[in-house]
Image (cartoon, rainbow, N blue to C red):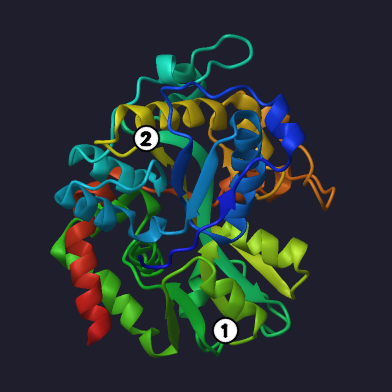
Amino acid sequence: MKNFTKTILTTVSAALISGAASADSHMSMEMTIVSWGGAYSKSQLKAYHEPYSAKTGVTILNDDSSSTAVAQLRAMNEAKNITWDVVDVEAAPAMQLCDEGLAMEIDPDTMLAAAPDGTPASEDFGDMLVSPCFIPQIVYSTTFGYRTDLVGDTPPDNVCAVFDTKTYPGKRSLFSVPINQMEWALLCDGVDKADIYDVLATEKGQDQALAKLDTIKDDVIWVSSGSDTPQLLADGEVIMGATYNGRLFSLIEEQKQPVAMIWDGQVMDLDGWIIPAGLSPERQARALDYIMFATDTQRLADQAKYISYGPARASSAPLVGQHADLGIDMGPHMPTAPENLSRAFLMNYDFWADYRDDLDAKFQAWLAK
């Protein structure tokens, strides 16, 4: 399995096992949870997996294959062999999986915990519930980091700096997928934010985006993982590059690299869980029990102790405090902080659910030229 890594999370000591609540006999005692790896998976490990294993004695197998989740779940369904129990995906892929019957529908008010004050989960998550199958977890953004020691006396503060190879010569990194890259290209080719998805829905608009990307194609290192750009920045192989804001937070605040962030043009997105359709009753019951635990108000706030992603529940936001190790206030590092949010634009999930397959093919054909 591509990019597969397994980490067996067992209860950390006999004392924890003896003190843990006995798992119901109708639930599986092992589960595979799929995510993205790196600092993000570490934040889930600390906030969700370890506490859940300590509470239940369940063994969690951690798989870092979320980047290929749609294709792999399609293949598993075709083979009638679903090996994953809970999968972390972005909102648009979750909508695809739901539309294709590959993810189970969730009733938030019976399957997810209410807020501490009794507010039903459907109200607490609110607009974050973009699909009947999607269980929101975090608000994150894809944005740019740059080397502070390589940009001269005029550090970039605008996303369109990525297209300015005269002022900022050197390699830059972009993801080798159309999502975000095509939005940035249109934005920096003069298209208003409010019109980007209407333009991108047309063949002319798609060609316009690729033509803009053509202007820097020879200067781009194309990456496929959220961990690639942070490593390229740390090694000084790129002057700027795109990745997730939490990855840049780790690079800047935890690793103390000479890197800064461009919040301008950040593409806001949602990430969360789906439960694959077709699980056995024992595995489905375990997945639902985990989801009830991992998406309650306190757990979502706890994840923000380890990474700068905003929790998806309204009741979690006031509980976001300091970084667990660094002791710094996490609020200003969130993409949803007012000063960061003012220059962002929100991912259009419906657009990408409808156009993803076609634009993937068109983008890959363009990359291969």
Q: Position of residue 137 (x, y in %)?
A: 51, 38
Location of the C terminus by quadrant is: bottom left
Look at mark 2 in the image and give the residue it sits on.
134
Say what amino acid the circle numbered 2 marks. Phe
**Kind of residue sitting beneath label 1:** Val
Q: Does residue 133 appear left or right of residue 58 in this picture?
A: left
- Front residue (pair 38, 164): 38
- Residue drawn at x 40%, y 65% is 184
- Disc 1 element: loop
Camera-near label (1 vs 2) is 2
Q: Secondary structure at mark 2?
A: loop
> Residue drawn 85% across and 48% down?
327
Q: Quadrant of residue 179?
A: bottom left
Pointer 1 and pointer 2: residues touching (CB < 8 Å)?
Answer: no
Residue drawn at the location 34% of the way across and 77% of the way down: 213
Q: Residues within 10 Å of mark 1 (few under 14, many from 20)?
A: many
Which dot marks residue 238?
Answer: 1
Q: Position of residue 205 (x, y in %)?
A: 22, 64
Q: Earlier in the sequence, mark 1 or mark 2?
A: 2
